[in-house]
Amino acid sequence: MSHPHADDPQKRELHNRRNFSFRLNLFFFITFVVFTVLIVRLAILQFVEGPSLKEKESQLGFRETAIPPLRGTIWDASGKTRVAYSTATQSLYFNVEKNYGDPKKAKLTEVQQKNREEAQLLAKQLAEVFNRLGTPSEKPLTQDVIYNELMDLEGKRYFVYVPRLIKTGLTQKEIAYFLEHKPEFKGIDIVEDSVRNYDPNSVAVQTVGYLKKFKGVREDSSYYKEKHEKRNELSTEERYLEYEDVGFDGIELMYQDELRGLNGVKKFPVNVAGRIIGPMELTKPQRGNDLYLTIDKEIQERSETAIMEHLKKLRNSSNRFESAPNARTGFAVAMEVDTGNVVSIASMPDYDTNVWKNGSISPENYRSNQYFMGNGAIREVQAPYEDDKERMKHPSSLVYLGSTMKPLTVLIGLQEGFFGPYYRYTDYGYAEIGRKGYERKIWNSSRRSWGPGMTPAYALEKSSNAFMVDMIGKRLYSMPEKDGKNGLQIWDEYMEAFGLGVKTGSGLPGEIPGLKDYIADAEKYSAQSALASASFGQLGKYTTLQLAQYTATLANHGKRIKPQFISKIVDGEGKVVKTFGREVLNETKFNESYWDVVEQGMLKVGAQGFDDFPYQFYRKTGTSEQDVGGGKRVENAVFIAYAPADKPKLAVAVVVPEGGYGSYGAGPIAREIFDAYDEEYGLDGVPKKKAKTDAAESETAADE
């Protein structure tokens, strides 16, 4: 069938015109719609999305580079000695980004062998540059040292992700060369760095702490892991940098936020291709705050020296009371009674923290110092013996208190009404525990009996184990429940109230609460046995800082105060940001007559080294027995004291593992610490050093 207009040219032309007209109208309509959409979109872009797009344009137009902040300084109590401070520098780091294998463990693959050859070549190139452009006076870094030690390809010293410090303190020529030839040195970064310097006299090094690289600790520390995970929520100024040195222990970690400061920022305008198109905008780093320790350098140094010299004397003494051939470590804490300020805290032997410069340590330095890095005054540190079997034969820094527990034991007996201040006890030299027919005798030291008429004060003076067991330990066990608590629980409450078995509240990282062995002993054997042993100073292992807080609590008549290590925080402009003072954690009230009994006994305790001490003072010696590996029993020397008696100013605690008798093994160290404090501050409020200086100046003026 043919088309209806096939034979009529006029009708065909009219049909074509109508089709054309329809298409033309459709075209114009579509064009109109498109332009309408474009105009509306442009309006939205300009008036609705314009401000946000403008902000994005600005952000895309700049590139920011962070400059690490300069860490704040840590000063001693006098404000004259910089215990820790930072200096700016430029450092070169190597990143382990390839698989190098370990030829000692398995045969290397072709890829691993090739990677090692590249690393050797890199080490050679670095050594040549250092030798040619480095400081002439410095010891040259050889290819062998760089490749075999500093690169640490096997990961013996660090995890793979930790950048390896190759050299710090780069010269300007070295920096310029490496930047100019960057493609030739793959895996190498030049970093704006800072070096942490510590007082060469090693002032309370374990308490002050040290630094490590952020990249190396961010996965191992929950504190830094959180910082890393929240980095995108922080500004460039606040964000932690991969190569930044951060506090890893002690005060450096405890006050990381205050010491750190804020990053500086280099801001460069760039085009779409990322090329710099204008001048840099610089925001300088904000320096961290300074900390002022309560630790006095002079007292700290004399404490450390006293420990080391006395340890040597104990090991070489022929006096049977003083001889302690295995006395290798000592710990001492001196804490002000009224403020809680810790003026010295010693864990000896110590080491030079400068081995941690740039957040890393050499294998040699680690091997020689590993047993002295831990703070034995606040946590358990093992005896410094390299052989594992030998180490188990010696006590750690955590020991029983021995007879230094007895002042509190007598207080408990008085407070619980087991006896009165003038009660008379007959000391047969021992006390018996256990059910009838299975009694066990607990003897006084040297099995000495003190006979009838022993008062509580006299029991303290003579350190009677029998009195403590019969009059307190056994009676606690036999007493009816009080407020739903048995005798063991009541004993535990008193311990914690005086700072034993709980953290001191100092806030120092890694501090432990001690070990309540009396609880485990009660579960394994009996509560009577546990309370009997605990009453005269066994079955409770505590740190020297806890022992010092306990001593200060005795001096404060039941008020437990927080040990303070920082007196104030000061910003970069010298403005005091925060101060610290006396803080009472808890208080246990006793009748004053009970304190008179305890201090009357403590006043008469014999103590070596105090014959010419110009003040009356309260003290208690302790010789704690402890079983160690191999069935060996050792004696640890413990000593506590506070002075002067009329107005206590300073509390001192000393622990010498395997030091023997407390009077001989620890007492003389405490005397040196009291003398040092008297010189600097004055136990009576008059610094003796200043008094001597003033007297000498007056005499000189009179002669003239």
Image: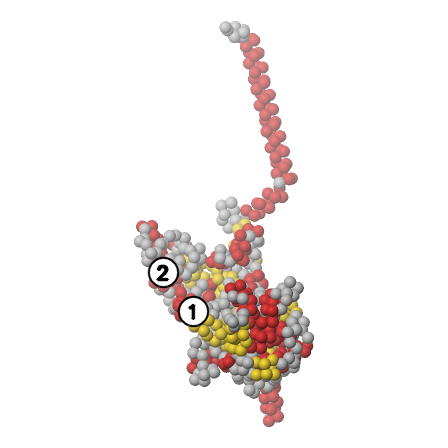
Residue 396 on image: x %, y %: 47, 70
Residue type highlighted by circle 2: Tyr
Name the image quarter holding the C terminus. Answer: bottom right
Residue 167 on image: x %, y %: 42, 63
Residue 254 on image: x %, y %: 56, 64
- Disc 1: which residue: 629
What is the crowding at mark 2: few (fewer than 14 residues within 10 Å), some, or many (at least 20)? many
Determine whether, in the image, residue 521 is placed left or right of residue 338.
left
- Res 301 visible: no
Query: Residue at image x 45%, y 84%?
Result: 319
Residue type highlighted by circle 1: Gly
Q: Is residue 39 above or below residue 267?
A: above
Query: Residue at image x 68%, y 75%?
Result: 591
Residue 518: quarter of image: bottom right
Q: Which secondary structure lies at badge 2? A: helix
Residue 144 on image: x %, y %: 34, 63
